[in-house]
Image (cartoon, helix red, strand yellow):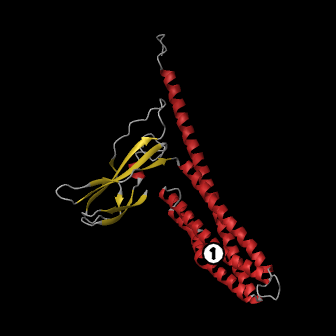
Amino acid sequence: IPGVLKLRDDHGLATAAAMFRVMSATPPENGEKPPEPPFRAAGVEWLTELQTGATEAELELAFDLQTAMKDPNPNSELNEIRPDTLLSIRFDAADRRAPEANQASSEVRTLRVVTREKLLQELRRRQSEQRNELERVLQKEVEARAELAEILSPTAAHADAPRAKLRVDQLARQQGALGKTAQAVGDRYREILDEMLNNRLFEPNVLRGIESKVVSPLVTLALEDFPDSARLTDAFARAGDDPARAAVVEAFDAIIARLRRIIEQMERTEDLAALVESLRIVIRTERDAEALLRQMRDSEGNELFRDRGDGKK
């Protein structure tokens, strides 16, 4: 769990500490609220050192839950932090006020721990949402391209020319809006990849490859291609000649081609996540079957050697 802790104090900062506690996410059968365990020190890695006496600080940190695992199997009962538990994190700080320091605590952030399979399902759903959003951008781009290729020249000696110019101006503004949407999709997709990395669902090199084929092209589209196409569309609204129209259509064709490549890569990434999820289910099923077989074997052995009570064994 990566994070940034922001601190501010007029007397100067003295200490900062991370605290955590773990509770069951399943309410007791009697319906009563279970007692809350006390917070205790969390073994976080401080990536930024606190400068004692500073009045402001931003400290980067990482809380690696894998270091707290006693069993490599994340679902094992031996692990305190496991699926179906609630992990609460809090930060405490003290200043250099004399003769007695002020102390304060942050608000408590509580996270629900889920299985890898459930996390993958949620991330796949979010990936699908972003792909659908980008497909809507593509559809609007295709429709706008077809309209610009056929629309009356905004400077033609025709009674409908002013209406055509108004429409071309609208399409130019639409390019700016679509660029912002592409930027937002890229930002959200990067967050999904970060969660995959933080939860070790894929190897870092795999995620870097996906980012280079999805997020980076979306950033380029948002910062370069869409603004350029908007300027060309605006230029066509003023000039209205065939070269200006051709330049607009060419720019739109390039955007459409790039969007299609990105969407295809998104589909491949979703398929990869589905494959990994299926493989993990198979592995878990095999592990559960082996455990059941061992249990049956031990049970049969105990039955074979159990004293039957008739003097015979």
The single residue placed furthest to the top in the displayed view is 310
State left or right for residue 84 relative to residue 183: left
| Quadrant of the rendering where the N terminus is positioned | bottom left
The quadrant in which residue 174 appears is bottom right
State left or right for residue 206 relative to residue 42: right
Q: Residue at x 34, y 42 (%)?
A: 38
Viewer-side residue, 5 vs 300: 5
Which residue position holds label 1? 176
Q: Residue at x 60, y 79 (%)?
A: 224
* Amino acid on which the number 1 mark rests in the picture: Gly
Please say if 164 is above or below 86: below
What is the x, y in percent for residue 5?
A: 37, 60
Q: Residue at x 19, y 54 (%)?
A: 100
Crowdedness near tag 1: few (<14), some (14–19) or many (≥20) residues, C-alpha within 10 Å: some
What is the x, y in percent for residue 98?
A: 18, 58
Please say if 212 is above or below 193: below
Viewer-side residue, 79 vs 304: 79
Give the mark count.
Answer: 1
What is the x, y in percent for residue 162?
A: 76, 82
